[in-house]
Image (cartoon, coloured by chain):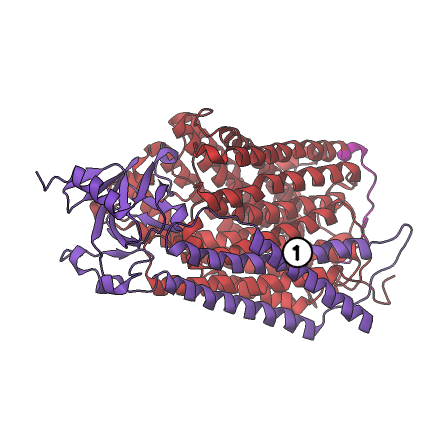
């Protein structure tokens, strides 16, 4: 009996070990290019490891049972008449409940760190024209003291393009240029159907819903060019509805901005 | 009771055309209706599968080069609608429910045989109408979710026909649901207690409650949507002051329970199949019953997890995260109980058992990604991507469809009286299992790395993984060939099954194969221990 439980502990440790190894060494995610991304990837890693332990464990149990308890040639009769085991059933109700609760609290914490729990209307007065209700996207208010930040951009989505309006320079661009390491606040509006604004490298996504202007805040951390993808079916050219976000040095951004700035003329 | 039974039997006989023709008639026999559901569903499965193949062919290359763009959207809409409303829902509920439930409760037929026949006969015309819409002015292009304003602005005729056919299918589903609830609660043979019913009855009771509570909401929503389309009302049209998010709430109030409508009956079927082939009682009967009812209750309060990126307020996101994640607990109980049922058994590893084990492995995987998706911060990145596509195919194909095949191998001998060929069955399983995982596992990576769903063109960096996925789809398409050959050849050439080829204890095995019109010669047997394997009196 003692021997048996040693084996059990050994096997469980091996499964956990393998899961941790895979969780820490296999990267399934794209580049991390915003302050949200490493937070997201931390959650992903935890969920991935827990998921692997459960999946490998259950699969191993099923395959082991199929070999171990297979009926032999010419064997008749039934297995043991075991109809249940209350303590076992309690164990596999309580342990998953604890895991689920842990995961829930942990992801709440992650969500809070991403800024998802902040009430939007408190810190975005200047975008909030009097009567209009502004809807909250995730990740508003990462730097709660800076409020809107200097870079406020209006995004209009339509079949099948994104347009980026820079109100401070009174110009419209087909590419979204932003300075690195600074909180960007975009106000998104749809001209026709529902679209979605997704930057995989930033781990953010927000639907753009007609009739509901929505704010989305994010802080890019890495210079580069990343795709902006429409993720909500919006018509025949939905797959082609893409744009680019160009994250650049502050000086590069200012040069670009001044080249396009119409208020200077 | 006897009077009722005799009357039922008499009505049935007077309505029975004989032989093969009865499958094309307005038959009132629950067994005939069950087979009608199954065969009809399978035909639509072949159509839906062909559409899926077209999608996978389009996605072999990153350009939109195989189908015109609007046709591609019609095809993905038809694929989703057909697979859900014409294949999985009617088969796991209608086909197996009709065939098995009267046996399990010890009745000669369902409570309302005519309503039952009406429920079935709504399906072929609405399915054909849906497919026909493609040839009129093109089918609906707005996906099976039909989100306004897209569904209001795309060509009208396709969208309206889509709405009509989903309404009829919803009606069929509600008729079926009422029939199952009444049959299970009211038509039980004297002496048969609820807690002695086979587990599939509980699964169908839970499912039918979900059907009856949530389907009318979908119907109402779609009727409002059709007003917006044809009468230019503004319920969901933002141009007229409507609110599109309201549509999403109403739609998912049905369509999330719809997932449980597709998988709960599958859970019930597996609970019948495993004990017989493992020669062991179903482990933890009572916890199974409670977990089914737990899923029913929780299943009704998780719908907004489909809308985490739709501008829902933070508190709502939090509530739906927790409610959704907690569904994993009753679902987990069922999986642990099934593995415990296998533990210490004497397992026959036949095709039915293989598909059931395949189901357990696939569904555990889909369940784990489901718990991850329930977490708002996780979902925000992968919502509306191929990660979600992969997740729900693990649930509805790796889950429900694997169970449908398992059930066909398990009950075919009862229905036809012949056994299916096991070698072809192994081949079918191997092709399906490998093809399925090859097709859908890589899609998780696609979603995480930036491929949205419902696109005909994509970033060229995803081409190789998409080709692997399409190769998997090819395997899945091929896998239907050995299955179809098996089913047709075995009708004539299969080994004679006898009444009880698996030595089962549930009531359907205690009659002839195929069963007589009245289900049993003489009185229905009283089965108080449907899973009494390994007990003294049974050797």
Task: Describe residue B50's horizontal placement relative to residue B10 as left or right.
Answer: left
Which of the two residues, A13 or B520, is positioned nearer the viewer here? A13
Residue found 25% across the figure and 50% down from its top:
A186
Of helix, strand and loop, which one carries label 1?
Answer: helix
Residue found 83% across the figure and 67% down from its top:
B535
Give the colour chain A carries in the figure. Answer: purple
- Location of residue A151 with respect to B197 vertically, above or below: above
The percent coordinates of residue B430 (x first, y second) are 71, 40
In this view, which residue lies farthest toward the bottom? A87
User: Is residue B498 part of the magenta span, yes or no?
Assistant: yes
Q: Is residue B5 visible?
A: no
Which of the two residues, B466 or B350, is positioned nearer the viewer here? B466
The percent coordinates of residue B116 (x first, y second) are 56, 48
Q: Main secondary structure of the magenta part?
A: loop
- Location of residue A95 with respect to B244 vertically, above or below: below
In this view, which residue lies farthest toward the left? A265
- Location of residue B173 with respect to A121 vertically, above or below: above
Give the colour chain B carries in the figure. Answer: red
Which of the two residues, B523 or A256, is positioned nearer the viewer here? A256
Q: Circle 1: is it few (<14), some (14-19), or many (20+) Cα within 10 Å? A: some
Task: Describe residue B464's horizontal placement relative to residue B142 as left or right.
Answer: right
Query: Would you name the residue on which mark 1 appears?
Result: A56
Query: Which quarter of the rendering shows the N terminus of chain B?
Result: bottom right
Region of the chain picked out in magenta, as a range: B490-505
User: Is residue B127 part of the magenta span, yes or no?
Assistant: no
Q: Is residue B99 visible?
A: yes
The percent coordinates of residue B346 (x first, y second) are 82, 57
């Amino acid at each position: 009996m003692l021997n048996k439980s040693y084996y059990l502990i050994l096997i469980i440790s091996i499964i956990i070990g393998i899961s941790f190894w895979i969780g820490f060494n296999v990267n399934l995610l794209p580049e991390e290019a915003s302050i949200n991304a490493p937070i997201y990837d931390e959650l992903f890693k935890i969920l991935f490891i827990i998921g692997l332990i459960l999946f490998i464990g259950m699969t191993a149990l099923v395959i082991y049972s199929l070999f171990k308890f297979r009926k032999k040639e010419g064997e008749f009769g039934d297995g043991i008449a075991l109809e249940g085991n209350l303590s076992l059933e309690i164990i596999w109700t309580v342990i998953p409940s604890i895991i689920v609760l842990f995961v829930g609290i942990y992801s709440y914490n992650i969500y809070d760190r991403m800024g998802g729990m902040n009430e939007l209307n408190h810190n975005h007065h200047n975008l909030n024209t009097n009567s209009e209700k502004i809807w909250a996207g995730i990740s508003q208010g990462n730097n709660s003291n800076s409020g809107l930040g200097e870079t406020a951009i209006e995004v209009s989505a339509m079949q099948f393009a994104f347009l980026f309006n820079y109100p401070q320079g009174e110009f419209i661009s087909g590419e979204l240029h932003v300075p690195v390491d600074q909180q960007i606040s975009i106000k998104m509006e749809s001209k026709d159907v529902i679209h979605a604004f997704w930057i995989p490298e930033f781990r953010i996504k927000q639907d753009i819903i007609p009739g509901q202007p929505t704010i989305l805040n994010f802080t890019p951390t890495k210079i580069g060019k990343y795709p902006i993808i429409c993720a909500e079916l919006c018509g025949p050219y939905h797959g082609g509805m893409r744009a680019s976000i160009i994250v650049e040095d502050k000086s590069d951004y200012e040069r670009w901005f001044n080249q396009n700035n119409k208020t200077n003329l | 009771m006897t009077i009722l039974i005799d009357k039922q039997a008499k009505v049935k006989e007077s309505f029975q055309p004989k032989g093969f023709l009865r499958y094309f008639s307005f038959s009132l026999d629950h067994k005939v209706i069950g087979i009608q559901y199954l065969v009809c569903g399978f035909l639509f499965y072949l159509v839906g599968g062909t559409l899926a193949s077209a999608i996978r062919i389009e996605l072999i290359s990153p350009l939109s080069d195989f189908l015109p763009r609007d046709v591609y959207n019609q095809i993905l809409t038809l694929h989703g609608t057909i697979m859900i409303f014409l294949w999985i829902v009617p088969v796991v509920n209608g086909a197996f429910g009709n065939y098995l439930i009267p046996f399990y409760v010890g009745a000669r037929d369902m409570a309302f045989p005519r309503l039952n026949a009406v429920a079935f006969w709504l399906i072929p015309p609405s399915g054909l109408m849906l497919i026909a819409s493609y040839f009129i002015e093109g089918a609906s292009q707005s996906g099976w979710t039909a989100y306004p304003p897209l569904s209001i602005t795309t060509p009208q005729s396709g969208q309206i026909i889509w709405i009509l056919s989903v309404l009829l299918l919803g009606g069929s589903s509600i008729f079926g649901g009422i029939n199952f609830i009444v049959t299970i609660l009211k038509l039980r043979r004297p002496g048969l207690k609820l807690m002695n019913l086979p587990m599939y009855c509980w699964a169908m009771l839970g499912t039918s409650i979900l059907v009856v509570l949530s389907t009318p909401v979908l119907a109402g929503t779609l009727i409002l949507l059709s007003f917006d389309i044809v009468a230019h009302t503004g319920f969901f049209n933002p141009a007229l002051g409507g609110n599109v998010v309201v549509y999403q709430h109403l739609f998912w109030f049905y369509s999330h329970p719809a997932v449980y409508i597709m998988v709960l009956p599958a859970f019930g079927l597996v609970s019948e199949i495993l004990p017989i082939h493992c020669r062991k009682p179903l482990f933890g009967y009572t916890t199974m019953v409670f977990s089914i009812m737990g899923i029913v209750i929780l299943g009704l309060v998780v719908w907004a997890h489909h809308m985490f990126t739709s501008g829902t307020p933070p508190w709502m996101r939090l509530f739906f995260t927790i409610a959704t994640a907690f569904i994993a607990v009753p679902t987990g109980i069922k999986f642990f109980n099934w593995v415990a049922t296998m533990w210490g058994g004497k397992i026959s590893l036949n095709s039915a058992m293989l598909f059931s084990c395949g189901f357990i492995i696939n569904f555990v995987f889909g369940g784990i990604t489901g718990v991850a998706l329930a977490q708002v911060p996780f979902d925000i990145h992968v919502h509306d991507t191929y990660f979600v596509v992969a997740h729900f195919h693990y649930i509805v194909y790796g889950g429900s469809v694997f169970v449908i095949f398992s059930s066909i191998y398990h009950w075919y001998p009862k229905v036809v009286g012949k056994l299916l060929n096991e070698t072809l069955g192994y081949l079918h399983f191997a092709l399906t299992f490998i093809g399925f995982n090859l097709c859908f596992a890589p899609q998780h990576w696609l979603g995480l790395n930036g491929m949205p769903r419902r696109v005909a063109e994509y970033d060229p960096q995803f081409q190789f993984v998409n080709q692997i996925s399409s190769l998997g789809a090819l395997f899945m398409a091929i896998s239907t060939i050995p299955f179809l050959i098996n089913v047709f050849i075995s009708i004539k050439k299969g080994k004679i099954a006898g009444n009880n080829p698996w030595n089962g204890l549930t009531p359907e095995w205690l009659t002839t194969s195929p069963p007589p019109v009245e289900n049993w010669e003489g009185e229905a047997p009283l089965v108080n221990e449907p899973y009494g394997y390994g007990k003294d009196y049974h050797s």
